[in-house]
């Protein structure tokens, strides 16, 4: 069974490019274009192995999405994927939200770095789930 990812980003071009890279690597990918839409979607669909979310988005940002996931006990790792327009670094974002998100990548991320983070978090999630 393919690893199922949800990619959420207010920048549609980034969202589509990221999803194309991930699909070529064998992932099943769904796309949404704002955090609020993702929050609504997750009310009925929680079968994702991992979520990749932009930081700055319309209606609800990546942090609001991450908080919703954690506050509602949804067991899906989330990576914040941030880039242009954000004046703080990925390490500063991670330090600020480390209890809420599982990883932070700066755009443009190298494909191998993105894959390593995704595979590591999905493996960790699967290990935890198998122990429960």
Image: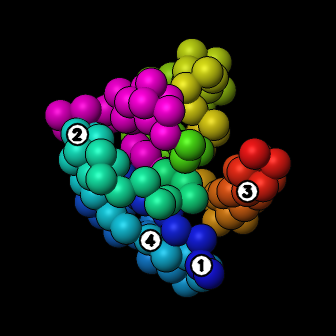
Dot 3 and dot 1 residues touching (CB under 8 Å): no
Few, some or many C-alpha atoms within 10 Å of disc 2 (few <14, some 14-19, many ≥20)? some
| Residue to which mark 4 is pinned | 29
Q: Position of residue 16 (x, y in %)?
A: 35, 69
Give residue 27's quadrant in the image.
bottom right
Alpha carbons under labels 4 and 1: distance apart: 10 Å
Residue 127 in the figure: left or right of residue 31: right
First along the sequence among labels 3 and 1: 1
* Colouring style: rainbow
Circle 4: element type = strand
Which stretch appears magenta? 52-74
25 and 4: which is toward the camera = 4
23 and 128: which is toward the camera = 128
85 and 101: which is toward the camera = 101
- Image quadrant holding the N terminus, namely bottom right
Alpha carbons under labels 3 and 4: distance apart: 18 Å
Q: Nearer the viewer, mark 2 or mark 3?
A: 3
Circle 3: element type = helix
Find residue 60 and name its label: none
Circle 1: element type = loop
Residue 46 in the figure: left or right of residue 11: right
Q: Position of residue 67 (x, y in %)?
A: 43, 26
Q: Is residue 54 magenta?
A: yes
Few, some or many C-alpha atoms within 10 Å of disc 3 (few <14, some 14-19, many ≥20)? few
| Residue to which mark 2 is pinned | 36
| Residue to which mark 1 is pinned | 2
First along the sequence among labels 4 and 1: 1
The residue lying at 78 percent from left, 55 percent from top is 130
Q: Nearer the viewer, mark 4 or mark 1?
A: 1
- Image quadrant holding the C terminus, namely top right
Q: Position of residue 61 (x, y in %)?
A: 31, 32
């Amino acid at each position: 069974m393919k690893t199922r990812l949800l990619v959420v980003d207010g920048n549609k071009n980034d969202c589509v490019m990221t999803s194309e890279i991930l699909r070529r690597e064998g992932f099943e990918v769904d796309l949404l274009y704002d955090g609020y839409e993702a929050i609504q979607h997750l009310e009925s669909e929680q079968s994702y192995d991992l979520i990749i979310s932009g930081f700055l988005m319309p209606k609800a940002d990546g942090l609001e999405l991450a908080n919703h996931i954690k506050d509602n006990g949804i067991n899906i790792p989330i990576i914040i994927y941030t880039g242009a327009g954000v004046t703080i670094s990925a390490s500063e974002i991670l330090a600020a939200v480390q209890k809420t998100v599982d990883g932070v990548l700066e755009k443009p991320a190298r494909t191998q770095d993105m894959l390593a983070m995704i595979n590591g978090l999905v493996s960790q999630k699967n290990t935890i789930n198998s122990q429960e």
